[in-house]
Amino acid sequence: MASVIVVENEIKDSVKEYGLIIDSIHQNSQFSDSLNQYFNIQNEITNKSELAAKLLSGSPATTLAKLSDKEFEPAFYLLVYLLHELEGTSFEKLFEKDSNVVNLLIEATPAQVPSLRDRRSLKPTTILSIINTFFNYLPTTSATRIYLVELICKIVSDTQIDFALVQSAIGDNLVSWLKDANASEAEIKRLFWFFVKLDKAYTLKSLQLIKAFTSQFTLSLTELHDLIVFALSSSVVDVSFLVNNNVASALQANSSDSLAQTFTQYTNGELVTSAAGDLSEDVHAKSKILALAKFFVQSDDAGKNSFLYSDIPSELVSSPSEFEKLLIDSIKAGVIEGKLNQVDETFYLVRVNRFVLAGNQEKIAHDWETVKKSLVQWKESLNNINEIVKNAKDNIVNNNNAN
């Protein structure tokens, strides 16, 4: 949606209005008085470029930052409007990298988010709001938009703004924005990974963004490492959905890399005994969940869906209580579903995630055939559902009548 900046006054009145804003900060009229020299007796501006320079020099970040959070944004819009009108400079030029306006905005950005009780101090989110306004104001093909996206990411990173505030708004549109602005593939990749790594919670939403991105772009070894570290740092246990054709190709091309080997083991449901690189310590625990799922998949393929505790491989669990904990963790992770009978020490499998990974066409064909078989069985089980429901109702009625 395009942004519109509304200024109701004539340019000369707007200059005087801005002068009063600066006066209010200094609590004197010196700045307004200094602007009088740029007006003739007919109250017309005599030198627009010098007046613009005066407005800018009288508005250092240290001064503007003294405005309250509510006052800063309209004051900054007014300053930008005046510079645009007086200099005849486009908004695109005003907001290009290293411009006076951008540097002023960066310098005014607070180092961190103020406390909830502090309602006056300037907030980093207000700076983001200003950048967003001009980002939307610029043509979609403007190269300046590429820089503004990067600037937003940098401010989020530097001030530790809650990533959730920008995750969907930017993440869902980032690639299309950059393509429209004619960013190179290298720029698109760099900015995407810069953006997604701001998510220190390693959320499912960001994993989905990574999946969508890697379906369009190939991965270098560095980018593959970024994906692996992010995926295995996430609380999402089953990240096998990330292994699309491009990711599979990158894993195959870097099969000797220790991180790639760990990720391949993990997504194939193999137990990871030692995690490489900067991976979190719980990778081993999460790999146990997937290894258990793989065991259940193989057993289900063989027609077995009822398991005694003693059936579970010893490398996964060493006691009944350990199996029960692993089972609970697996159910919480959404990897399996079933019923547990602690008295008989038996688990009845209802559903288990299957590993359908790109890269191995023979295995994919086998996995899809298994999925198809399961769907057919499910369909057949529904064929007489009406009769089952009717019989159940009749039994209830008969039992009630007998009582």
Image (cartoon, grey):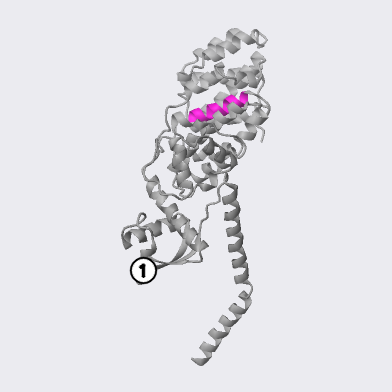
Instruction: From the image, give the main secondary structure of the stretch colored magenta.
Output: helix
* Residue at image coords 46%, 31%: 157
Quadrant in which the N terminus appears = top right
Would you name the residue on which mark 1 appears? 345
- Disc count in the image? 1
Asked if one can make out residue 73 in the rendered structure from this viewpoint, the answer is no
Q: In this view, does 119 lie to the left or right of 380?
A: left
Image position, residue 190 (x, y; %): 55, 28
Q: In which quarter of the image is residue 15?
A: top right
Q: As rendered, which of 308 and 322 lies closer to the eye?
A: 308
Looking at the image, residue 42 sits to the left or right of residue 170; the answer is right
Which is nearer the eye, 201 or 304?
304
SS of the residue at dot 1?
A: loop
Residue 156 at least partly seen? yes
302 in the magenta segment: no
The segment highlighted magenta reads 144-155
Q: In x, y percent, where is residue 220?
A: 54, 31
Q: What residue type is labelled 1?
A: Glu
Q: Compared to 212, does 102 lie above or below? A: above
Reply above or below: 393 against 145: below
Q: Position of residue 76 (x, y in %)?
A: 55, 24
Q: Is 144 displayed left or right of 324 in the figure?
A: right
Q: Give the vertical position of 279 relative to 72 (above or below).
A: below
Figure check: 42 above or below 157: above
Q: In the figure, residue 395 lies in which quadrant?
A: bottom right
